[in-house]
Amino acid sequence: MTALVAVQVVQRLRVADDGLYLYRGILHPDVDDLAFIGCGVDTLNSLQTAGLQARWLASLLQGSLHLPSRAVQHADLTAQQVWRRSFFPAAHNRAARYAQYTVDYHAQLTRDMSCSSGQQLK
């Protein structure tokens, strides 16, 4: 049986004990050409979340959405880790817990897609 994701890719994802921290719950700054749609976050409305994530990714691939530098994305992941580890109890899926903040997460993705073409995300 072959692996779904190469070992080298899994190593670059650097999955923490409390889950996989992703930029916007979709991308990892150190792994190109791999996105997580509908599986990297746990929200109150999985179908709506997956739809918004797919639209966000499509905007990125079409060029109407531009990512910030890898350094900025890493800073965002670090901030997520610090906040989540101070707020949520320890758990294997702490990185994916968005349920209480579903509306805020959806608003963040929507705001990102509202940026004018050529504008970088913050």
Image (cartoon, rainbow, N blue to C red):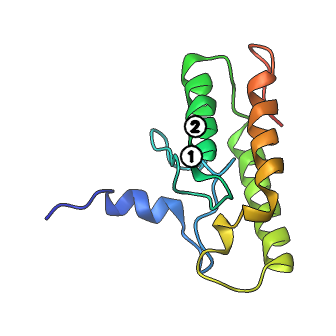
Q: Say if 13 sits above or below 110 in the image.
A: below
Q: Which residue shows up at 83% across the image and 61% down it?
A: 79
Identify which amino acid the numbered label 2 is placed on.
Answer: Gly
Q: Which residue shows up at 29% across the image and 57% down it?
A: 4
Instruction: Quickly name the residue at label 2.
Output: 51
Query: Given the current orientation, which residue lies at the most extreme top position?
Result: 117
- Residue 74 lies left or right of residue 122; in this view the side is left
Q: Say if 60 sits above or below 47 in the image.
A: above
Q: Which of 26 and 55 is in front in this view?
A: 55
Instruction: Tell me if label 2 and label 1 are in contact, CB under 8 Å.
Output: yes
How dense is the environment of label 2, judged by Cα within 10 Å: few (below 14), some, or many (20 and up)? Answer: few
Residue 71 place in picture, x, y as percent: 74, 47
Q: Nearer the viewer, residue 17 or 46?
A: 46
Q: Which residue shows up at 58% across the image and 37% down it?
A: 51
Disc 1, SS: helix
Quadrant containing the C terminus is top right
Residue 52 place in picture, x, y as percent: 64, 37
Q: In which quarter of the image is residue 82?
A: bottom right
- Residue 89 lies left or right of residue 63; in this view the side is right
Disc 2, SS: helix
Quadrant containing the N terminus is bottom left
Residue 53 place in picture, x, y as percent: 60, 39
Identify which amino acid the numbered label 1 is placed on.
Answer: Leu
Q: Nearer the viewer, residue 45 or 87?
A: 45
How dense is the environment of label 1, judged by Cα within 10 Å: few (below 14), some, or many (20 and up)? Answer: few
Residue 14 place in picture, x, y as percent: 54, 67
Q: Which residue shows up at 49% across the image and 41% down it?
A: 32
- Residue 34 lies left or right of residue 64; in this view the side is left
Instruction: Quickly name the residue at label 1.
Output: 47
Q: Quadrant of residue 54?
A: top right
